[in-house]
């Protein structure tokens, strides 16, 4: 692997330039901006690296970029990534244009640098290094790169149904991973699901003067009362049957949580958020258990009436709230959506409109899977320290759609760090982490192919 690592070191600046060029392409799924153009750019990057690729249209959605390079061994490793990014708003909080891809103090600042273009380009560059320096790959590699992850991978299920042969693999490297506040390399073996809903209450046929609040119903109050029925002050979700399918962690998973807790600094993380305490005063193993193995109910946004400067005495005609439920095995998003509807009706809020904005089911890989050991050993060799293996991420992705049907064991790793600011202004990665991430993927390919 010394030759491969030498190739990566010699072309570090070139690889960074490739990432900057990709980050300069806005590809905002929520607004339908630049998706087809960015997909074509990703396919060209793969071909430049020696990976045959094509852009596959998906009816009703963004195209998927598929790349594949045959290896000498019998195994196939799948890489899942996405080329779409979150909207960059609020623009005024960026220190530089979010699509300028500026480098400052050893960091690349751009929307998508960490989530997910940095990880994608690192993987492409790792395959190139193996091909150019060794002349072959030890395993067959496949890339599935979609353009709708940030809006719930809406059409990915259709792609998987129509192209099951393109998804087949012995293991998968998922799109995300990072280094935490203590610089531990964090690997993740699963994702939470999500049931994202929009609730809308309506009243009069127009906004009214607030003096008529004596006789005209206020949809903002009605929405607040409805939201208050979802969860109590002790963080318990009150929807009937909500917890019925929640799996408790296994003994092996609890043992892993104890190992993680021993290496993490809860106080540093708490201070990083500017908090005096975490919810319920939790810390250590119990904090991790709740964070990774419990579902959530989160009000993501509320809009109604007037909220500008000064006063405006208005009674709004409508009120809208966006709420997400992060789900854990074995909860199902469609079941939770039905339970939310039933709950609101049972509490007298059947008049509220309830709209599904995105449903994904949770997924998890057993800690005993061989690919877990390989990715962890690769991290030890590249980073020189023991990685933290999380049984699951707290976030969500389409792992259940892509890898769960065929029981493909899946591990997430990536090039971000604790202050990469994913989904926030000034998203960034450290150049050093990007280069180490390329080496990590190359080492995974080497060990997965039987190398020593």
Image: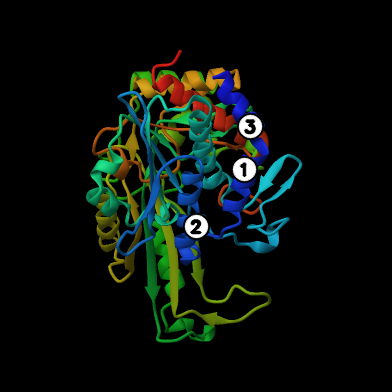
Q: For the residues marked 3 and 1, what is the alpha-carbon distance in whole angstroms? A: 11 Å
**Label 2 or label 3, whichever comes before in sequence order:** 2
Residue 169 in the image: state x and y as whole percent.
30, 33
Name the residue tied to disc 1: 420
For the residues labelled 2 and 3, say whether their Cβ atoms are less than 8 Å apart: no
Name the residue tied to disc 3: 181
Name the residue tied to disc 2: 38
Q: Which mark is residue 272?
A: none
The residue mark sitting in front, 1 or 2, is 2
Q: For the residues marked 1 and 2, what is the alpha-carbon distance in whole angstroms? A: 22 Å
Residue 379 in the image: state x and y as whole percent.
53, 22
For the residues labelled 3 and 1, say whether their Cβ atoms are less than 8 Å apart: no
**Label 1 or label 2, whichever comes before in sequence order:** 2
The residue mark sitting in front, 2 or 3, is 2
Q: Pick whichever, 290 or 440, lies toward us.
A: 440
What residue do we see at 59% from left, 46% from top? 19
For the residues labelled 1 and 2, say whether their Cβ atoms are less than 8 Å apart: no
What residue do we see at 29% from left, 61% from top? 347
Q: Secondary structure at mark 1?
A: loop
Q: Pick whichever, 181 or 345, lies toward us.
A: 181
């Amino acid at each position: 692997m010394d030759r491969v690592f030498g190739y990566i070191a010699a072309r570090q600046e070139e690889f960074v330039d490739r990432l900057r060029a990709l980050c300069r392409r806005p590809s905002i799924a929520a607004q339908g901006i630049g998706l087809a153009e960015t997909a074509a750019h990703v396919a060209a990057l793969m071909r430049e690296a020696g990976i045959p690729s094509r852009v596959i249209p998906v009816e009703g959605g963004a195209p998927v970029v598929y790349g594949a390079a045959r290896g000498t061994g019998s195994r196939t490793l799948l890489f899942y990534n996405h080329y779409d990014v979150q909207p960059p708003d609020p623009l005024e909080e960026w220190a530089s244009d979010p699509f300028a891809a500026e480098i400052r103090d050893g960091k690349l600042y751009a929307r998508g640098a960490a989530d997910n273009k940095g990880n994608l380009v690192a993987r492409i560059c790792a395959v190139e290094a193996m091909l150019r320096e060794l002349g072959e790959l030890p395993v067959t590699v496949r890339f599935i790169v979609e353009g709708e992850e940030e809006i719930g991978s809406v059409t990915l299920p259709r792609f998987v149904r129509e192209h099951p042969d393109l998804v087949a693999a012995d293991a998968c490297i998922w799109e995300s991973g990072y280094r935490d506040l203590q610089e531990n390399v964090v690997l993740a073996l699963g994702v939470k699901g999500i049931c994202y809903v929009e609730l809308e209450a309506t009243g009069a046929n127009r906004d009214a003067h607030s003096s008529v609040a004596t006789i005209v119903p206020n949809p903002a109050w009605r929405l607040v009362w409805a939201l208050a029925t979802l969860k109590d002050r002790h963080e318990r979700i009150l929807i009937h049957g909500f917890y019925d399918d929640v799996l408790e962690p296994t003994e092996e998973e609890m043992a892993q949580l104890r190992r993680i807790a021993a290496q993490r600094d809860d106080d540093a993380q708490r201070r990083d958020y500017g908090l005096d305490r975490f919810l319920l005063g939790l810390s250590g193993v119990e904090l991790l258990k709740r964070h990774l193995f419990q579902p959530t109910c989160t009000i993501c946004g509320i809009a109604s009436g007037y909220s500008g400067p000064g006063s405006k005495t208005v009674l709004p005609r409508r009120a809208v709230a966006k709420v997400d439920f992060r789900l854990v095995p074995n909860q199902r998003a469609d079941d939770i959506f039905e339970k939310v509807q039933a709950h609101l009706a049972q509490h007298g809020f059947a008049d509220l409109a309830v709209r599904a904005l995105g449903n994904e089911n949770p997924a998890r890989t057993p800690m005993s899977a061989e690919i877990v050991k390989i990715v962890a050993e690769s991290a030890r060799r590249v980073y020189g320290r023991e990685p933290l293996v999380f049984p699951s991420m707290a976030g969500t992705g389409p792992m259940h759609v892509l890898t769960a049907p065929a029981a493909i064991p899946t591990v997430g790793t990536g090039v971000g760090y604790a202050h990469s600011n994913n989904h926030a202004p000034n998203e960034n990665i450290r150049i050093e982490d990007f280069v180490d991430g390329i080496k990590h993927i190359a080492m995974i390919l080497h060990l997965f192919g039987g190398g020593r």
